[in-house]
Image: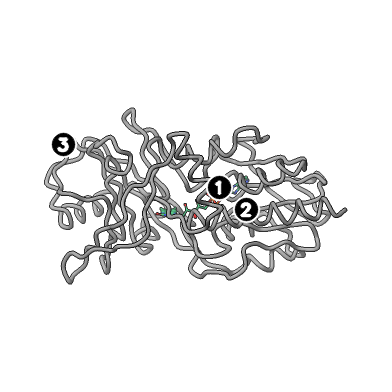
Amino acid sequence: MSVVVVGAGLAGIACAAELVAAGVAVRVLDRADHVGGRMATRTVDGRAVDTGAAYFTVRDPEFAEIVARWRTAGLARPWTPELAVLSGDGPGRSPGPMRWSAPQGLRSLVEHLAVGLSVELNREVCRVGPGPTVDGESTDTVVLAMPDPQAVRLLHPSLRAYEAAAGRSWRPVVAVAAGFETRSWGELPAAFVNDHPVVSMVADDGARRGDAAPVLVAHTTSEVARKYDADPDGAIPEVLDALSQLLDVRDEPVWTRAYRWRYAAPEADRDVPFLLGRDGVALAGDGWGSSRIETAWRSGTLLGRELARRHRAS
Ligand SMILES: Cc1cc2nc3c(=O)[nH]c(=O)nc-3n(C[C@H](O)[C@H](O)[C@H](O)COP(=O)(O)OP(=O)(O)OC[C@H]3O[C@@H](n4cnc5c(N)ncnc54)[C@H](O)[C@@H]3O)c2cc1C
């Protein structure tokens, strides 16, 4: 059996890791020049900043084993069991499961899982057709591990995966990172911001990274992300205004960056972990469950396991 996995986010890499462990030949293709997808880390001003996912939680015992390996490698650390809530009703707290962070950025976790896999970067796939084929080349199975709207663009309409992914809407986010001279806000691991027209979440990147750097990363509401879709930098002044109101940040930032996520999270959950069509085309990712990092890992892992089982049975 030969498998092509399109997408080197956590779901695609987890799927490929399962397959390789079962002795199946896998190629992973990603259009970016790095793995990680929405577990995105950029270097700004000489320091890693998480510009996609903010943190992760751990519920599944098997995922906990992977996280333990990341922790032993110095790549993951428990960050905070409680986030702040900012709303018109005044400040509150959101207790919950431990939120984990990555001292070198969340992308480092996917890089760790990808060691030993055959990953081709800067490789944009344009067409997945019946056969199945990937840009005209035949393979036994194709896995698309990415948001539904990105998968739909590639898929031939006759494929079962096209039908499963078409018409599913995803919410956009613009992430605005801002670096300051000094830390002028109070104790803040991160905060959910309720009912605000501009910002939905803000995280203290220095607190989550553990280096206390005066860096904030705010996620906009979907409305603001749609408004600035063609010009994400345009969201920066509105976000900075919102931060000065919400956190009483008075200083001007030394630097700012804006990152657009056109497909940050699906509008609706699914209750199955992946799709595997009889036509050899499969879908995986955080759209297959409740959108979060752990879901992406689980989706890719379970699909990889099912493909490995079929490989052994054939
Ligand atoms: C702003 C933001 C905040 C978030 N906050 C959190 C959080 O706090 N906690 C949490 O658990 N989760 C959070 N998430 C969600 C989390 O990032 C995702 O659940 C997870 O990273 C999804 O992984 P994935 O592998 O399914 O998809 P992705 O990471 O999106 O991977 C898809 C990959 O496919 C590639 N690709 C797409 N099209 C093509 C093509 N045509 N050819 C080749 N490659 C292609 C992309 O380059 C990408 O690398 C957040 C996401 C965003 C954007």
| Crowding at mark 2 (Cα within 10 Å: few <14, some 14-19, many 20+) | many
Q: Disc 3 residue type? A: Thr
Residue linked to disc 1: 10
Q: Which of marks 3 and 2 is in front?
A: 2
The response on whether ligand 1 sits within 8 Å of label 2 is: yes
Residue drawn at 24 percent across, 37 percent down: 212
Q: Name the residue under label 3.
A: 182
Give amino acid for label 2: Gly
Verify CB contact (< 8 Å) between mark 2 and mark 1.
Answer: yes
Q: In this view, does 192 lie to the left or right of 124?
A: left
Q: Are marks 3 and 2 in contact (CB under 8 Å)?
A: no
Foreground pick, 267 / 77: 77
| Point 55% across, 62% down: residue | 287
The response on whether ligand 1 sits within 8 Å of label 3 is: no
Q: Which residue, given by chain and number where applicable, does mark 2 sit on?
A: 300
Q: x%, y% of residue 290?
A: 50, 65
